Image (cartoon, grey):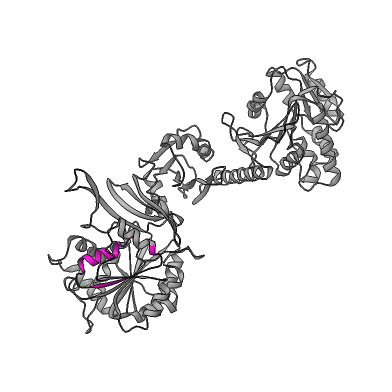
Amino acid sequence: MVVIIPKSEKEFTDLSYWKKFFKHNSSFEWYGDYSKLGQIFEKYIKSTDSILQIGCGNSSLADDLYDNGYRNILSIDTDQNVIDKQNKKNLENRPTLKFKNCSATNIDLQNSSVNVIIDKGTLDALLPSKYSEKEYILVDSIFNEIERCLAPFGRYIILSSQEHIIQKLLNYFDKNQFMIRFQKCFQSGKEFVMPVFAVIITKLKIPLPQKRKIEYLNGLDIQPELIETSEKLIERIKAEQQLSWFKHYISRGPIEEASLKIYFSNGKERYELFIIDEYNIKKLTKYGVFIVPLGRENDWIFVTTKGRQNLRMNCQLHRLIMVRLFRDQDYQSLDAIQNELNNIILDFMPKDCINQKINYLSLGSTDVSETIETGNSKINGKWTVEHVIANELTYRRLIFLDSSNLVQSEVEVNKIKNKTKDEKEWKINWSNPFSCEHHKNMTLALNFLFDKEGRSILLENVLNEKLRIAVLGVGGGIILKAFHDILINSIFVGVELDEEVVEIASKHFEFPKNSERIKIVICDAINFIKESAEQVDKFDIIFVDLSGQVNPEGLYCPPSQFVTKGALTFMKKMIKNGGVLALNLVTRDEQTSIDVKKTIKSVFSSVYCVRGDEDVNEIVFCSLSPKNEIDEMIKETKSRQLPSNICNWLKEYTDRIEKIVEFTI
């Protein structure tokens, strides 16, 4: 059979086109046939209902309705040739079916005489998106006739995927006399990229005192979602259209990675889904879902592209849907999440996985083990201190929820029996103070110190030196606290913009804010470095561990103003001869990383970097000491055994010097 479809909207609304169309096509079903739409009709039509189909064309819908128990059906169309063919085809086997040459603008029926009126594509054919006044008036006259012919509690059922059609229906029928429901047709033709909606408009016996809310159903057997205005409904439909386009996009074959967010009707984020494919294969035959537990969403394997690919490979899947949850939402259980997501997960299933069982994977709990305290800082916004279990260990974390992809501070905690109370309480494990990879790597700054003669200061001697150390970005105070405890003769300056953060550090991370060897400066760190650059007292080490809003180049840490040539020059002036700047650099863009390090290299003669295997953070060590001296220090540190007066955790972290590489242009 040759199917001649419209080439333009003009053809679509041209009566002569449809005459030609019906002449060449014995049967054609806009928006799918009964096998795909039958559930919708059977839900909203009773077998005893009197049914009117407008614009029947050569569709077999009336035949299928008849064959499924509906006997009282009248179909109308303005093409006499089509009507003759329909009557001839059904005369013998479906004797009660009626087909009549009649316009929907002047229906030859009595008032309130029909229980159901069906429109499957007729409005689409009559009203283009850029309609004329004449076309607009024509459709209004059809609606007037439908309103006249429908009996009280009768239903007008329209099938369409066109936004302007839906808007026209709302403009006319969204009033006190009608109840409107939108039903998404999940089983409608897969050849359509855009979703098809069944609009069920019920005529009430008498007008209500006020309009009912519009009902929206995303499936056949779920409770309707109540939508207050037609504008919000259009937004909802646009979201479905975007989702359908997205499903079409990922159905074409493997993609590198894509993501989307699912929102509640109140506008709050409910889920974020990442689609991760094995890109270099033709067929995706292994499919599954991984739900990230709350409290683990900031782990490297979940927040980086490389990490998510590793997760997919570890799950041994060709396509993995990674599901991220949101802290302000309530999730009852993994099973509840699975039930909620099942339809959309089925939509994202690769075609070569059809009929496979979908495996839902996770690490176990869908919640942090304990929330210690939450608050709202004037500067950093909402924050939370929580306990998270990972690899059978418990960690205390400080997270600012507006930047939840970055853990501000993290330290291991253990439950220890209180000597004065007959109960256990949480204590920080200071025998292993750094759980974050980048903090462990930052400790290597202690190896980059040189004396006045340019000789490397051995680590065991560094511990007894009277150093002056600045930490830009106090956070939970982990760096300050850990070095304060082992560098017993050193003094520290902590710079923090948000005074409340210092209080959180003191209360929940045992930060010794009242120590005589720690000075806290509450100010913008960029102002601090400008002022300190002119001071006589210089620093042996400056740690820069600042975060901010992501800039257009994808730089997370530090804020971009700290890696300009001007700011780096200020910090260079702050450092003693033989001192070091250790900077935490976080970006997911390799070129941004290179550009930042090039700028650093233009200010500091020696630049070295270290990054963990599973870490998006890169620590950049900036020094004015000669390259040959630093290379000799690294070589010696690698080869020699550290003495016993160095604590175990510092010995362990010093082994990371194996991974240090020089940055060269």
Quarter assignment of residue 214? top right
Q: Residue at x 46, y 50 (%)?
A: 280
Q: Image height check: is 293 above or below 449? A: above
Q: Residue at x 38, y 64 (%)?
A: 499
Q: Image height check: is 372 above or below 470? A: above
Q: Is residue 321 left or right of residue 620?
A: right
Q: x%, y% of residue 454? A: 23, 82
Quarter assignment of residue 594? bottom left
Quadrant location of the N terminus in the rendered image: top right
> Do we see residue 28 in this rendering?
no
Between residues 351 and 189, which one lies in front from this camera angle? 189
Between residues 128 and 221, which one lies in front from this camera angle? 221
Is residue 588 magenta-colored? no
Q: x%, y% of residue 189? A: 64, 35
First to last magenta residue range: 476-499
Q: Is residue 467 left or right of residue 601?
A: left
Q: x%, y% of residue 159? A: 70, 34
Q: x%, y% of residue 631? A: 26, 75
Q: Image height check: is 324 above or below 502? A: above
Between residues 649 and 21, which one lies in front from this camera angle? 649
Is residue 496 magenta-colored? yes
> Do we see residue 424 in this rendering?
yes
Quadrant location of the C terminus in the rendered image: bottom left
Q: Is residue 116 left or right of residue 520?
A: right
Q: Image height check: is 91 above or below 632? A: above
Q: Residue at x 53, y 48 (%)?
A: 260
Q: Residue furthest left?
A: 644
Between residues 254 and 194, which one lies in front from this camera angle? 194
Q: Residue at x 77, y 32 (%)?
A: 25
